[in-house]
Amino acid sequence: MKQTRYLLALMLLAGSAAAAQVPKSIPGEYHLQGVMETASAILLKPDSTFELYFSYGAMDRQGHGKWQFQDGKIILNSRPRPERDFALVTSKAASDDFTTIKIVDSNAQILPFFETLVKTPGGEKYGKMSQEGIFQIPKTKTTGIDLFFSLAPERYTSFPVQSDDNYFEFRIEPWIIEIFVENIVLKPEKDGLTGEHPLLKGDAFSYEKMK
């Protein structure tokens, strides 16, 4: 019993020491600098959670998670990204002369911003969805379907096809524009942060801390 209490005491002390190592100046709001036509910010909260905002063109995106201070650096992690950003609603053998890929959503205005790659024995067929969220090619055997969201180019899902169906209907999952981060590293500087951005290539971005 004494040994157990001793171990618990050591664990509590270690946790307190780790918390004490986080500079009080770190929590705050940081805005991305020097990237044209892009607005982005990171809010580091005192409770070790963060919120992330990104705006480019007509698309606003957000993310959230937890941050930790380790070896003089800030590390951001969100919940694990779900495996797929789309779900197959219906797959069937339709009595027409087309292979049809359709995306459905309550917001019809977003449907033209999706693209697909249909894999067939004769090669890959690429196309953009119509205003109704539909892409069609002459009826053919389908071995796979890839779906892309053009406003969030890193988001795509692959579906293998193991049937003779020629009609495939998909829905958009609600997290498709959520920003997911994994071990994004930022270094505290005098007036802000430098380091990575979850949606932009490179590791030398600058974030200015708001006063």
Image (spheres, helix red, strand yellow):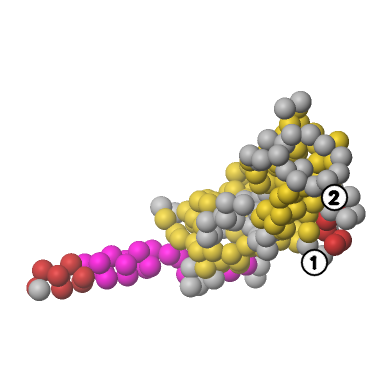
Query: Where does the image place residue 110, in percent across and percent down from the top left?
Result: 83, 58
Amino acid, disc 2: Ile
Q: Which residue is mark 1?
A: 106
**Which one is nearer the viewer's eye here, 90 or 101?**
90
Point out which mark residue 134 bears: 2
Work out which quarter of the rendered image holds the C terminus and state it.
Answer: bottom right
Instruction: Name which residue lies at 78% across and 54% down.
Output: 103
Query: Farthest residue toward the right?
Result: 131
Instruction: Name which residue lies at 72% across and 36% down.
Output: 142
Amino acid, disc 1: Ser
Work out which quarter of the rendered image holds the N terminus and state it.
Answer: bottom left
**Which one is nearer the viewer's eye here, 160 or 112?**
160
- Tag 2 secondary structure: strand
Q: Which residues are magenta?
A: 10-31
Q: CA distance from mark 1 to mark 2?
A: 15 Å
Point out which mark residue 62 bears: none
Q: Quadrant of residue 7?
A: bottom left
Query: Where does the image place residue 148, in percent across and percent down from the top left?
Result: 73, 46
